[in-house]
Image (cartoon, grey):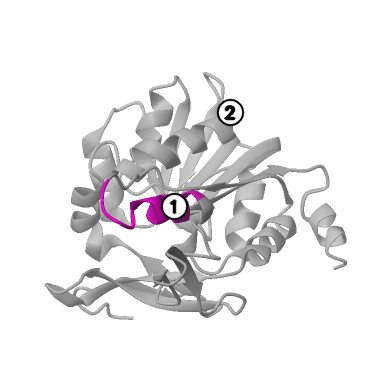
Amino acid sequence: MKQRPGKPSRKSDRKGSIRTDWSPVAEWYDELVGDSGSEYHQKVVIPGVLRLLAAAQGDAVIDIACGQGVLCRALHGRGICVTGADAAVELIRAARERGPAEIHYEVADAVNLSNFGDGKFDAAACMLAIQNIHPLPPVFSSIGRILKPGGRLVIVMMHPCFRGAKETSWGWDEEAKVQYRRVDRYLIPRKTPIVTHPGSNPDQYTWEFHRPISGYVKAMSQGGLLVDAMEEWASHKKSTSGPKAGAENMAREEIPLFLAIRARKVDGGKKAGAELFGE
């Protein structure tokens, strides 16, 4: 399929599944994230991922959909043997240019990690990318295959309950003086185009795929990965002035921004997961 200028690749494999690719927005994304990530990366997400991964010095860890390598560099700084994989050639090029040379980067699609051997890694991470990848089952099957027995997977996403693109929003209750989060849709999976340059280039967009939390848990289980931890992370930001500051801070503390899930590869792999769901 010929790719239209300014839009993510939407190639179909022989089974008809849609593949998304951020190559056309790689320059924008690299400038947005930079060497160390956004303040959300630095203050909330990366510290949480490192804690949940609990990787020791010398462990082999793969960052799936690594982008231009923010998490890879953080892991490398802890003495971890890091591999970064991403389907976007331009983002892998940017990651290699940012270094260091000891980090191994490969162009690889998350739905087919055939570049990597069975049981190669002690742990895997997918940070703020799983909601942009479709379909889910082959992603977790591939991860389950390349993890060692007992290996850990940590995924972090925008919270699917409260941060659905175009289906959730903030509101203000003037009578109660409460800031609330409105949720219009949740259970039904859907895909939504996300404009990367609002106003300046409305024709350039990426995709977000919404699924309920149960969809992630089931797909991981089918891949032989059983959840052993789940955390909901709030924003680190604080309002310091204005009549709504207290309500804004309360809303931030009560309504999480991110969802983190950790799963482990279990004995029996896919068979154990299928039995759990009666399949």
Residue type (three-letter) at the residue carrying disc 1:
Arg
Mark 1 sits on what residue? 252
Point out the image quarter for the C terminus: bottom right
Taking the spot 77% from the left edge, 55% from the top edge, the residue there is 270
Secondary structure mostly seen in the magenta stretch: helix
Considering only vertical position in the picture, is 20 above or below 224? below
Q: Residues within 10 Å of mark 1 (few under 14, many from 20)?
A: many
Q: Any mark on residue 160, and which?
A: none
Residue type (three-letter) at the residue carrying disc 2:
Ala
Spatial CA distance of label 1 from label 2 is: 27 Å
Taking the spot 47% from the left edge, 26% from the top edge, the residue there is 81
Q: State the extent of the magenta-drawn residues as a range.
A: 241-253
Disc 2 secondary structure class: loop
Mark 1 vs 2: CB contact within 8 A:
no
Considering only vertical position in the picture, is 240 above or below 20? above
Disc 1 secondary structure class: helix
| Lower position in the chain sequence, tag 1 or tag 2 | 2
Residue 32: image x %, image y %?
22, 51
Which is more toward the observer, 182 or 223?
182
Q: Any mark on residue 54, and which?
A: 2
Residue 51: image x %, image y %?
54, 31
Residue at the limit of the structure toward the left, as seen here: 200
